[in-house]
Image: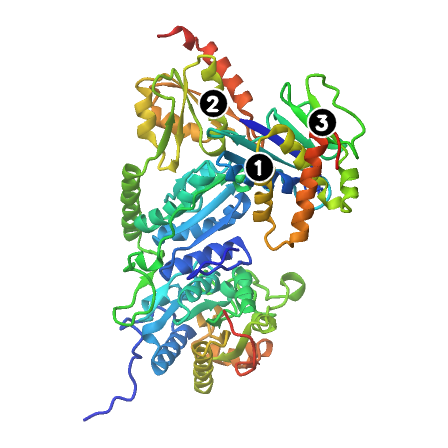
Amino acid sequence: MTKSVFQRPKYLKNVPFHYCPGCGHSIIHRLIAEVIEELDIGGITIGVPPAGCAVLAYDYFDVDMGEAAHGRGCAVATGIKRILPDRIVFSYQGDGDIAAIGTAETIHAANRGENITVIFVNNSCYGMTGGQMAPTTVLGQKTTTTPGGRTAPMHGTPIDLSQMIALARGSVYIERTSVHSVRHILKTKKALMKAFTAQMNGKGFSLVEILSPCPTNWKLSPVEAFAHIEKEITKTFPLKVIKDEIDANRQGSP
Amino acid sequence: MMEIDNATFIQAESEIAAINMVLGASMAGARAMTSSSSPGISLKQEGISFLAAQELPAVIVNCMRGGPGLGNIAPSQGDYFQATRGGGHGDYRSIVLAPATGQELADFTARAFDLADRYRSPVVLLIDGMMGQMMEPVIPPDFVNVADIPYKNWILDGARDRPSRIIKSLILDPAKEEEHNWKLYRKYENITKELQITEAYQVDDARLVVMAYGTAARIAKGAIKRVREIGLKVGLLRPLTLWPFPARAVEDASRFVKEFLVFEMNTGQMVEDVRLALKHRSEVHFYGRPGGVVSTPDEIAKVITSLYYRLHLEEEQ
Amino acid sequence: MKKTVFAGFGGQGVLMMGYVFAVAAMRDGREVTYLPSYGAEMRGGTANCTVVVSDEEIFSPVASSPDCAVIMNKPSLLRYENLMKQGAVMFLNSSVIDRTPVRDDLHDVHIPANDIARKLGSDRVTNMIMLGAFVAKTRLTSLESIMNGLQENVKGKSGTVMKLNRKALDMGADYVLKGTAS
């Protein structure tokens, strides 16, 4: 009798991912599915996928999924959660989605303290459209629209959306993690667990920013891309708990 | 804001957020609405396109003001094309209702929710700044008990005892997107068959029929009352649905009436639909006042009278 | 069908006058439209509203050739005089308006509303004095209906305030009917 030690999580459909080799989305999808399973919330979870590389996330998660226009994840999630406050609602957004076109929706959902969970996948470029500069692109990074590397005078400096969200009084938990090593993958899962649990307990807005490799647009091998996160990206986006007020005594969220 | 049991009210940070909250609420099975005036409606178009594509019911109120651009805040009908041609990107239509009185505003808002649910489509209440400001006595329509609204079997409320659902509009395969477009088209065809509403006022013996909707129709009605007093046989055909446009009623009227005058608070938008419906069977004349100018019944009475005599309608049988 | 314009400075209670009149007429069982003017500014500038009262369907709520006007200040007289219907009645707050209409086909009724209000010890009821005079003269509704309309509009106001309003309405009415504000 063999014992199964590794299997597909219950809430991932039995279809292969379309993501590039070495892409972080597949790992992150799996982590979310594991967390949903371990918290036993698969039957009450509604996900909101983004526009961008993860636009097809609804083909992978085996929970109810409702598509949002580019950047509007937090507004759509707000609408769902306000109608069904006892369900678990998460929005899954890339850095172009959340930190450029959807900045306003995100900040205001956080500020209202919407009791939702946002998974913010930061690969420091617009992956799906060909690797153009995103608001999160780090200084010096070469992209198709910054062929000489991003410079502050020309393009501004990378935006730290998570820090901005931390300033919003309605946000209770914000952590930046990464998936470039096993250790960090495990830490990411812990952070996701904490964020979803906070929502289950009605604590308010939680967000996990996950640094994710984009070997294709970074023009690196997957292994090099992992190292690039460790050496370069984390300099601009240090991994840490940015805000944890889950247990603070505060007014209830809507 | 009125407090209603079992209802949620959110003041959104922007029109874009508002329409997307409506979209989320609709996905979750709620009856949801949002309102704005012209420039804000432009911002909402992204979400309206998604509502149409994802076949989600919603009600959107556009209290039209003078435009384009910032324009002014006076009553206008400049957004007729935007509302009746879809407005946002893609090949779709929204049901567009044009109430003209306080009572109709109340009744049609309730009806809009029913239509939105029935056809799984956004429904636009196209009104103007006049109706937004004016007060009239209203007998409120009966409130529907939320529990009496049939459960929608397509919503996202958690896949507890059923397979998981997806609501989306991304269809990368052109063949499938074409299929989706034709599916929507067939729905629009049905709506066009089932939902054409007009009010006819003194049309039976009319030699000239005025066509106008909303505030313009009220003014036209006042004008017609005046010209009837001096014996001119003029009637009013008032569309209450702008999309679908009530082509049948226009066609019917054209069997007896050879002259039509379209009056709008713009430079001529609905007049194109009137021409399409008439297929050159009758003559179409146009009078418009754009920019937030509100005509008086006297002014329209003069326009009608001069046209009536210019066409020698008083000489006919 | 009677169209009445109420006009004056913002803050003179012009919209309130029209609204209370509209509610009163509605409770009388008549067809009514109430259309306030609206500008971008909340304070200052001119304020006006149109109330149409009729026994049949009202078509246009706009003040084209009004039958009556209740005019609270001089700029409003200048603005509305030329728009009035032939034979129309203009109720003028003569405490602040020092002239009469130039047109000789109009009736003008002068009420020193601010002066009467001061006798009552409150400038704030100037509008109620004008409204009392307007209702007494035109009989488009009754003072009782106005009081009911007022009650609906100012829920929670103390009995003293309502008494003051009633007194103001009566003094306005008395002034135009008896020539005195007793």
Q: Secondary structure at mark 2?
A: strand
Q: Residue B62 in the image: x percent, y percent?
A: 49, 44
* Residue B66 in sight: no
Residue appearing at x 60%, y 34% in the figure: C50
What residue is shown with label 3? Answer: C109
The residues tagged by marks 2 and 3 sit, at their Cα atoms, a distance apart of: 43 Å
Q: Which mark is residue B286?
A: 2
- Mark 2 is on which residue type? Phe
Q: Which mark is residue B277?
A: none
Q: Residue B185 in the image: x percent, y percent?
A: 30, 43
Q: Are marks 1 and 2 on the same chain?
A: no
Residue C11, image quadrant: top right
Q: Residue C105 in the image: x percent, y percent?
A: 68, 17
In the rendered structure, the residue with mark 2 lies on which chain? Answer: B
Estimate how packed mark 1 is, as few (under 14), some (14 to 19) or many (20 or more) residues with alpha carbons within 10 Å: many
| B165 lies left or right of C162 | left
Frontmost residue, B299 versus A220:
B299
What residue is shown with label 1? Answer: C35
Frontmost residue, C159 versus B169:
C159
Q: Are marks 2 and 3 on the same chain?
A: no
- Mark 3 is on which residue type? Val
Q: Secondary structure at mark 3?
A: strand
In the rendered structure, the residue with mark 1 lies on which chain? Answer: C
Contact? badges 2 and 3 (CB < 8 Å): no
